[in-house]
Amino acid sequence: MSEDGSADYTAITVELAGEQYTLRTDADEAYARRCAALVNERMQEIGSDPAPFAKKAAIMAALSLADELFKQEAGVRSRSRALVKRIEAAIED
């Protein structure tokens, strides 16, 4: 954040499906590039020639990543519930 409370944005250029995109982000540049690389990798897994199908590949990559995120989130919630039960049981003893 800058002194006036607004976010500081950096413009970085990344390549997705063979095309250049400029991202404005307040995230660390290396992190933003890692995110773009993951999306690009997922798009390449979905189709070998992304140019004519870039929009479809991007949508499929986004859905695949969202699915992974939700599955990880569910696993964290499950482990958290188990930990709470263990703590409650330890307190009761």
Image (cartoon, rainbow, N blue to C red):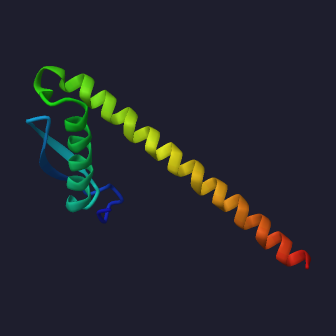
Q: Is residue 5 left or right of residue 46?
A: right
Q: Position of residue 26 (x, y in %)?
A: 28, 55
Q: Where is residue 23 in the image (x, y as percent from the top left)?
A: 19, 44
| Any part of residue 29 in sight | yes
Q: How many marks?
A: 0
Q: Which residue is drawn at 14% across and 51% down?
A: 12
Q: Where is residue 92 in the image (x, y as percent from the top left)?
A: 91, 75
Q: In this view, does 42 lie to the left or right of 16?
A: right
Identify whether 26 is placed above or below 60. below
Q: Is residue 69 left or right of residue 41?
A: right
Q: Position of residue 49 (x, y in %)?
A: 12, 27
Res 59 → quadrant: top left
Residue lying at the far right in this picture: please name it. 93
Q: Which residue is drawn at 83% across and 70% down?
A: 88
Which image quadrant: the N terminus?
A: bottom left
Res 78 → quadrant: bottom right
| Any part of residue 9 in sight | no
Identify whether 68 is placed above or below 18. below
Q: Residue at x 58, y 53 (%)?
A: 75
Identify whether 93 is placed above or below 24. below
**Closer to the camera in the image, 28 or 17:** 17
Which image quadrant: the C terminus?
A: bottom right
Res 30 → quadrant: bottom left
Q: Residue at x 18, y 22 (%)?
A: 53
Identify whether 84 is placed above or below 59. below
